[in-house]
Amino acid sequence: MSETSDTFVERVVGATFLSVDTFEEVEADQSATLQAAMIVAIVVVALGIGAAGSGTLPAVFSATGAVIQWAVWAGICYLVGAKLFGGEATWDELLHTLGFAQAPGILWLFAIVPILGRPFFAIVPLWVAVASFIAIRQALDIGNGKRVLTILVALGVSGFLETIF
């Protein structure tokens, strides 16, 4: 894959394999918002299919809800990371990178295979978490300590909002 991958599939593969170059590329690309939203929606479908086969989770998921949750999460990370901890990013840049960070979730599709179901439901969330850590690092351009604090504070705010709504 080239350093400046320009196709959607190359970007998905790059994000899945945790390519810092891919996250840097999508951060600045204004056209990446729609691509990131497509990844979030595809992951929801893959999770639904994988869950249906494994019996791990209910098979009905809302792509619209997932896209809204992704946008809210990016907004919270933006407010905490950029406004509170001095990161240099826009909400759009976090939308791009955090949307692409969901790319490993496409692998949930393979959880439909009975023997793979439970391992995938254990491994894929960790993979997405690592990708999200890289996404936040690349978007906000802040140090590890502030990045960890951004994630922890954002998780707290997100949890608080979920209890209210």
Image: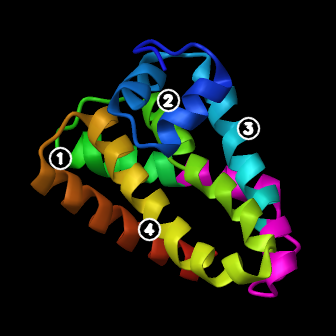
- For disc 1, the neighbor class at 10 Å (few under 14, some 14 to 19, many from 20) is some
For mark 3, what is the residue? 38
Q: Which residues are magenta?
A: 48-72
Percent across and percent down for residue 8 are 66, 24
The structure residue drawn at horizontal position 27% and vertical position 46%, both measured from the top left corner, is 81
Main secondary structure along the magenta-highlighted residues? helix
Q: What's the amino acid at mark 2?
A: Asp
For mark 1, what is the residue? 85
Element marked by disc 3: helix
Foreground tag (3 vs 4): 4
Horizontal side of residue 74 vs 121, given as left or right: left
Q: What's the amino acid at mark 3?
A: Met
Q: What's the amino acid at mark 1?
A: Phe
Q: Which of marks 4 and 2 precedes in the sequence?
A: 2
Q: Which of marks 3 and 2 precedes in the sequence?
A: 3
Do the CB atoms of the residues marked 2 and 3 lie less than 8 Å apart?
no
Dividing the picture into quadrants, the one containing residue 152 is: bottom left
Q: CA distance from mark 2 to mark 4?
A: 24 Å
In this rendering, the answer to whether 100 lies above or below 165 is: above
Q: CA distance from mark 2 to mark 3?
A: 15 Å
Q: Which of marks 1 and 2 precedes in the sequence?
A: 1
- For disc 3, the neighbor class at 10 Å (few under 14, some 14 to 19, many from 20) is some
For mark 2, what is the residue? 92
Q: Nearer the viewer, residue 157 or 103?
A: 103
Dividing the picture into quadrants, the one containing residue 155 is: bottom left
Q: CA distance from mark 1 to mark 3?
A: 30 Å
The structure residue drawn at horizontal position 33% and vertical position 52%, both measured from the top left corner, is 133
Horizontal side of residue 64 vs 91, given as left or right: right
Q: CA distance from mark 3 to mark 4?
A: 21 Å
For mark 4, what is the residue? 126
